[in-house]
Amino acid sequence: MTELKGGANDMRGHQSRNAQRENAMRLTEKDFKFICQFVYDNTGIVLNDSKREMLYRRLTRIIRERKLKSFSAYCQLLKDQPEHEKDFFINAITTNLTSFFRENHHFDFLSKEELPRIIENKKVLANGKKRLRIWSSASSTGEEPYSIAITLLNTMKAESSQWDMKILATDIDSDVLAKGKAGIYDIGRIEELPQKVKQDYFFQGCGKSSQSVKVNDNLKELITFKQLNLLHEWPMKGPFDVIFCRNVIIYFDKKTQQELFARYYEMLTPGGLLFLGHSENLGNYQQYFSNVGRTIFRKPY
Ligand SMILES: C[S@@+](CC[C@H](N)C(=O)[O-])C[C@H]1O[C@@H](n2cnc3c(N)ncnc32)[C@H](O)[C@@H]1O
């Protein structure tokens, strides 16, 4: 007796193809370990078992885009063409959560305590201006450096023309940097900001773009966005008056954190400030700074 099309044989074939596909898309322990090591070596980010789900989801997307059939094939691609694939891979695995005026107490401290102190103490240089440098060292999509820029302009007001002020915004992820540079956000991202800040620093789009806002040129002119892996050499000279290093070292191990703190220390001017994220601390490096506010640390003069 001949089988009808779509009968038991076909069903078995279909099931085994499904099983093959499912097997191929299983993240084996060996591949998981390779990927974790690749991430650690290239970013300093420590991935553990709790990140397996997240890794699976994000990498499945890339594997499909690459039209590959398995995690193993993708691992092989990372081994064969690390330079070609690295940026794309890193962009996929970084966590970029941020918002305007996140941890607002830092911006309060900057405007009420630190900027008045800087305004009072900075000397005028040969170019007739006072120099101010701030570094947002894991700037993600730009909300952090733009919040710094708004705080500077609001605090300096008329005085701002006497200043040579610059904000450096860096991140390892080239996609988030492009977004920061463009300075275009969903309108919902600025919902909670005071009306005056919205009016002074953002334009609302019209027509198809009516749900987007764009930051104005006064903010953009203050900021330079650059790709920088914190683990690599830092090409800038500094020194910085203030460094924001918020919600990034949490992804690193203690050794990497301590190495970075030593480098941040060197990059700060005497009396300069280091801001960390809400769940971060300096560990053993605390002895070299004084704690002047919630997760705010000053390098001694
Ligand atoms: C959670 S976001 C923090 C954004 C912002 N600082 C804040 O607190 O809202 C962490 C950022 O760190 C960046 N990052 C991770 N590893 C990095 C590295 N090795 N060098 C530079 N940036 C890194 C990620 O790309 C991501 O944009």
Image: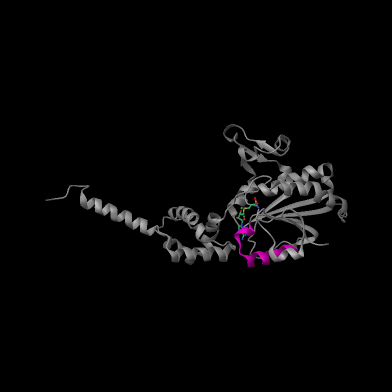
Question: Magenta segment, principal secondary structure?
Answer: helix
**Vertical order, 29 against 14 (above or below):** below
The answer to whether residue 21 is left or right of residue 41 is left
Question: On the image, which quarter does residue 264 sit in?
Answer: bottom right
Q: Residue furthest top?
A: 207
Residue at x-position 83% and y-position 42%: 158
Question: At which x and y percent is residue 17?
Answer: 30, 55
Number of numbered discs overlaid on the protein picture: 0
- Residue closest to the eye, 101 or 90: 101
Q: Quadrant of residue 197?
A: top right
Instruction: Please name whichever residue, 299 or 282, is drawn nearer the observer in this view of the structure.
Output: 282
List x then y, in percent, for residue 171: 63, 56
Which image quarter: residue 281?
bottom right
**Horizontal and vertical percent position of residue 292:** 78, 55
If the image is split into quadrants, where does the C terminus sit? bottom right
Viewed as shown, does residue 189 lie left or right of 223? left
Residue 144 in percent (x, y) is at 68, 49
Give above or below for 137 relative to 184.
Answer: below
Say how the picture is coloured: one colour
Q: Which residues are magenta?
A: 248-266
Q: Quadrant of ligand 1?
A: bottom right
Residue 284 is a magenta residue: no
Does residue 84 appear left or right of residue 126 in this picture?
A: left
Query: Which residue is drawn at the image coordinates 56% and 64% (left, top)?
Result: 40
Residue 267 sits above or below residue 223 on the image: below
187 over 97 or under it: above or below: above
